[in-house]
């Protein structure tokens, strides 16, 4: 299971958080700067990694029980 949070501007993805990497990745010049800034905040990274367990792992049991 992977938790992904993407950021878009004018329909172009400029940054993404990936729980498998545990950090932000930038795709544009602006996105690279934002990813570096966001990756320097360890509390935000911990929050997003906890969101995987809080949201994804909780709901995957519900998803598979309905199949």
Image (cartoon, rainbow, N blue to C red):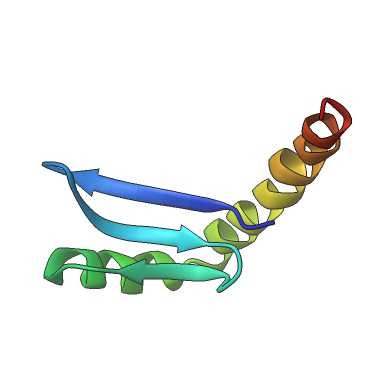
Left or right: where 31 falls relative to 35: left
Residue farthest toward the front in the current orientation of the protein: 67
- Relative height, residue 13 to residue 62 (above, below): below
- Relative height, residue 56 to residue 39 (above, below): above
Q: Quadrant of residue 10?
A: top left
Q: How many marks?
A: 0
- Measured as percent of width and height from the top left, residue 36 is found at 33, 74
Q: Nearer the viewer, residue 49 or 44?
A: 49
- Measured as percent of width and height from the top left, residue 60 is found at 78, 40
- Relative height, residue 33 to residue 13 (above, below): below
Left or right: where 67 falls relative to 51: right
- The image quadrant where one finds the C terminus is top right
Q: Quadrant of residue 33?
A: bottom left
- Measured as percent of width and height from the top left, residue 61 is found at 86, 37
Q: Which residue is painted at 59% across and 63% down in the image? A: 19
Left or right: where 27 falls relative to 24: left
Q: Which residue is painted at 60% across and 69% down in the image? A: 20
- Measured as percent of width and height from the top left, residue 53 is found at 76, 49
- The image quadrant where one finds the N terminus is bottom right
Q: Which residue is painted at 27% across and 64% down in the image? A: 34
Residue farthest toward the top in the current orientation of the protein: 66
């Amino acid at each position: 299971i992977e938790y992904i949070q993407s950021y878009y501007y004018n329909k172009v993805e400029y940054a993404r958080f990936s729980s498998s990497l545990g950090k932000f990745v930038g795709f544009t010049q602006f996105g690279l700067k934002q990813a570096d800034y966001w990756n320097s905040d360890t509390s935000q990274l911990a929050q997003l990694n906890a969101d995987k367990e809080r949201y994804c792992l909780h709901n995957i049991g519900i998803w598979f029980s309905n199949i």
